[in-house]
Amino acid sequence: MVEFIQDLWAFLRVRKKIWLLPIVVVLALLGGLVVATQQSSLATFIYTLF
């Protein structure tokens, strides 16, 4: 996983696409939120926020 992040960072830096980093981070956080709320008691608290 660390190697993937290093490769992604190198790609963004070399191609001058640093502006994509916030988008990638937000998508990763949303994906983690979806995984965390699958069949858990945390889901009821997350659904009340939206």
Image: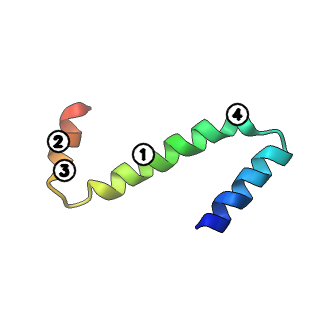
Q: Name which residue type carries label 4.
A: Trp
Instruction: Say what amino acid the circle numbered 1 marks.
Output: Leu
Q: Which class describes the residues within 10 Å of circle 1: few (<14), some (14-19), or many (20+)?
A: few
Left or right: 48 with respect to 14?
A: left
The quadrant of the image that shows the N terminus is bottom right
Q: Quadrant of the C terminus?
A: top left
Mark 3 — residue?
42
The reply to whether callout 1 and callout 2 are in contact (CB within 8 Å) is: no
Mark 2, residue position? 45
Which residue does the image show at 26% across and 59% down from the upper left? 38
Residue tagged 1: 30
Residue sitting at x 65%, y 64%? 4
Real-space Cα separation, disc 4 to disc 3, in angstroms = 32 Å
Measure the C-alpha gap from mark 3 to mark 1. 14 Å
- Give the SS element for disc 4: helix
Labelled pair 1, 4 in contact (Cβ < 8 Å) = no
Q: Quadrant of residue 16?
A: top right
